[in-house]
Image: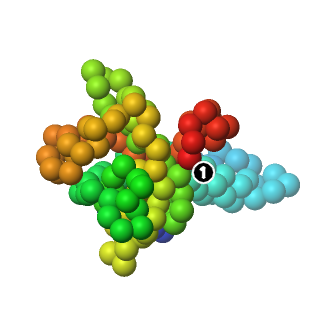
Amino acid sequence: MHEQSQIDILLSAAIKSWGGVITALGFFATTISLFIIPKETKYETRWVIVIFMIFAYLCLVLLRAFIDSYNYSNNFLPKIKIARKPLGAYQTTHALLLLNPTPLLTYDSLVSIYILESELERLVGIGRVINIQLDKKIQIAVISDVDFGDRWKALYENRSDDLSKLIIKPSVPNYIIEGAVNV
């Protein structure tokens, strides 16, 4: 899934919102109003109907854009590309992870790391964004181990089945922030 701008989302929503059908209904309602509404009315009711149809269409497009944006953001958790043994300044951490680009993370953000086991996500670590590369890939240092132990070292082999079980989330459980785990 590629990153979309707000304009892309709005244009896509306008296309998906059945613009032709709404336009035809608006034209039909306006044409009918020419024959049904008496000419002695205080307001040009025909134009009120046209304006109402335009307003209804814009509301429909914005609703569709909101739904598309929500669905798009929910399917956008970053995937781990590479796991490495920490070196240099990061020797005290458990692992270094390289993630696909995502707008959900910024420099120095805390992330939680989960592993998917038997359809349940289990917290295994807390990480910190240490770098966002020029190609937008994100480097994370795993700064806190939560019952994962030596399994971090097994990740250095970069087997895709192991890496795909890890889930990076751009939030940290509340009890971590309150100090239950030293971060």
**Can see residue 11?**
no
Density class for disc 1 (Cα within 10 Å; few <14, some 14-19, many ≥20) is: few
The answer to whether residue 125 is left or right of residue 178 is left
Asked whether 119 or 10 is in front, the reply is 119
Residue at x-position 40% and y-position 36%:
124
Q: Is residue 95 above or below residue 181?
A: below
Q: How is the image coloured?
A: rainbow
| Image location (x, y in percent) of residue 36 | 65, 45
The residue drawn where x is 29% and y is 26% is 117
Q: In front: 127, or 16?
A: 127
Residue 31 pos. (x, y %): 55, 53
Q: Amino acid at mark 1?
A: Cys
- Residue 82 is situated, as x and y percent measured from the top left of the image, at 24, 57
In the image, what residue occupies the spot 40% across and 62% down?
Answer: 90
Does residue 150 appear to the left or right of 141 in the view shown? left
Give the camera-side residue of 20 and 79.
79
Give above or below for 7 relative to 81.
below
Q: Residue 4, relative to residue 26: is it above or below? A: below
Residue 133 appears anywhere in the view: yes
Quickly name the residue at label 1. 59
Left or right, 162 with reference to 106: left
Name which residue lies at 37% across and 59% down.
91
Image quarter hosting the N terminus = bottom left
Q: Is residue 141 left or right of residue 86?
A: right
Give coordinates of residue 94: x percent, y percent: 36, 49
**In-front residue for pair 52/42:** 52
